[in-house]
Amino acid sequence: MKEFNVCIVGGGSTYTLGFLKSFVRLREEFPLKKLVLFDIDPERQEPIGKYGEILFSERFPELEFSYTTDINEAYTGMDFVFMQMRAGGLDMRAKDEHIPLSMGMIGQETCGAGGMAYGMRSCVDMIKAVHDIRRLAPAAWILNYSNPAAIVAEALRREFPGDKRLLNICDQPENVVRSCSRLLGCDWEDLDPVYFGLNHYGWFTNMYDMKTGKDLMPEIRRRIKENGFLPQDAEQRDQSWLDTYGMVQTIMNDFPDFLPNTYDQYYLYPEYKASHLNPDYTRADEVKDGREKRVFTECREVIAAGKLGDRFDAISDAHAEMMIKVAESIAFNKNDRHIMIVENNGAIANMQDDAMVEVACELGANGPRPLGVGNIPQFHLGLLVNQVSVEKLLVDAFFEHSYQKALEAFTLSRLVGDAKKARKVLDALIEANQGMWPELTDPKGRARTERVRIGG
C-alpha cells in the first residue's frame, strides 16, 4: 500500500497533538511515510515537535518525523499539506474578540467584525503559503481548515481559480453530526446528513440512518426539545462551548424546521449574544487558560520523562480524525461523503453560482462532487445571501485595497448593522492590525494601513 508524505502547517497549534496521536491510531487506514510539522514560531512548535519524536519512537518508529521553520523542508515532496495556521496567533484573536465586544458588538473568531479582521490577516498568510506550496510541491493536495474558512475560501477561489487540489473544509458540521450520535445513542458513521449553508452558518435538513434510510430528524428535534444538546466530547470542552451547544435548543424552539450549525446563534441573536459575552474574557482567553495549558503541560511532562508511558490518550480526536479521513478518501478514491466548502454552481439552486457554500460532497481522487439540495427556504436564503455579500465585499476590499469596500462589508454584516458602528469598529481594527492587513485606501487616496505584500 502506498505511503504518503504529509506536512502540517501550524505545527505549534494546540490541535497538532491530536493529529500526532490520530496518525498513530489510523496508521493502517492512512499509512504515512513522512510527517513534517511547520510553523513560523519555533519556540511554540518545539515542545510539540519533541513530544512527537517521543511518541513516534515508541508507537510508529518507521515514520520519518521532523519539525521545521524552513518552507523548503516543509513542502518539498509532500503529497498532502494540512493548513491550520492562525494568522497573528492567539494574541490577535483576543483583539478580534475584545475590540468589537467593547463597542457592544459580537466579538468572535470567525463571525462579525472580529471574524472579518481575522479574515484579512488570514488571506495575506494563506495566499503566500499556497504560492510557496505550489512552487515546491505542485501536485500536493492542500487541505485548508484555517479560519475564517469562508473568507479564506473566497480569496483562494479568486487567487487560484484553476487549482482543483486546493480544498476548504471545516470540522464543525461533523462535530454536530457526532453530537447527534451522542443524543441518539448510535455510531456517528451510521448517520447520513443533508446540509446547506456557508461555513459556520448552515442547517441540517435531514439526518438519515445509513442502515435503514429512516430520517432521524423528527427524533432529534424531540430529544433536543426535551433534553437540550451537548457536544459529543462534552467532558473535554470548555464552558463557552457547552453554552454554544446549549443554544441549539433555543434556536430550534424558535426555528424548528432544521438543525442549526452551532455558530448560527451569532447571526440569529446578535444583540443577545453580545450582551452575554464578557469583553474582558473571551474564548481566546479561555483557550489560553484551558486547552493551551493542557496541551503544553502534557508535552512538558512527556519531554521531562523522556517517554510516553501511559500518557497516550486513545480517545478519538474528531478534528484530526476528520481531516485524516478526508485525505484518505482522496488518496484511495473512496468517494466517501464529507461536508465541504465548494463553489456553488447550482448545489443550492436559488443562490448565486460563485458563492462558496458548504454542502455534502462525494470526495475522491478527482476532488469533491457536491450533492445538490435544490432551492432553500426564503428565510435561510435571505440570511445567507446577506452573508455572501459581506464576504465578497471584504475580499474585494482585500484585493482592491479599498477602505470603502471594507466599510460596506462591515455595514452590511448582521453582527454590526449600522454604518457609524461599522466605521468605528473598522478603524479600531485597522489600528490593531497595522502591518498584518493589506493597505486600505479611502476614496481620497489616503492610506489607512501599511502595505503588506499579498502576491506570490
Image: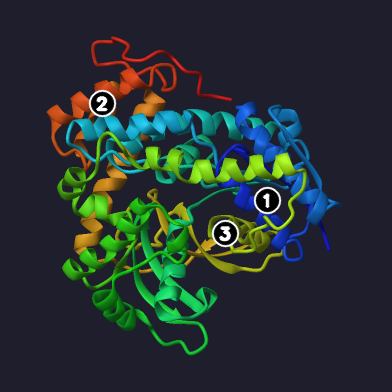
| Residue 234 vs residue 319, the one in the foreground | 234
Q: Residue at x 50, y 35 (%)?
A: 86
In the image, residue 134 lies at what x, y percent?
66, 35
Q: CA distance from mark 2 to mark 1?
A: 39 Å
| Residue 12 vs residue 281, the one in the foreground | 281
Report helix, strand or loop for mark 2. helix
Q: Residue at x 78, y 40 (%)?
A: 77
| 169 sits left or right of 21 in the view | left
| 346 sits left or right of 427 in the view | right
Q: Which mark is residue 317?
A: 3
Report helix, strand or loop for mark 3. loop
Q: Which mark is residue 426?
A: 2
Q: Residue at x 32, y 41 (%)?
A: 108
| Residue 442 vs residue 375, the one in the foreground | 442
Q: For the residue marked with disc 2, what is the amino acid?
A: Leu
Q: Quadrant of residue 277?
A: top left
Q: For the residue marked with disc 1, what is the amino acid?
A: Leu
Q: CA distance from mark 3 to mark 2?
A: 37 Å
In the image, residue 202 lies at what x, y percent?
33, 59
Q: For the residue marked with disc 3, what is the amino acid?
A: Asp
In the image, residue 21 lies at what x, y percent?
67, 55
Q: Earlier in the sequence, mark 2 or mark 1?
A: 1
Q: Residue at x 60, y 37 (%)?
A: 12
Which residue matches tag 1? 20
Label 2 close to label 1 by CB (< 8 Å): no
* Residue 26, above or below 418: below
Report helix, strand or loop for mark 1. helix
* Residue 172, above or below 66: below
| 104 sits left or right of 151 in the view | left
Q: Earlier in the sequence, mark 3 or mark 2?
A: 3
Estimate how packed mark 2 is, as few (under 14), some (14 to 19) or many (20 or more) residues with alpha carbons within 10 Å: many
Q: Is residue 320 visible?
A: yes
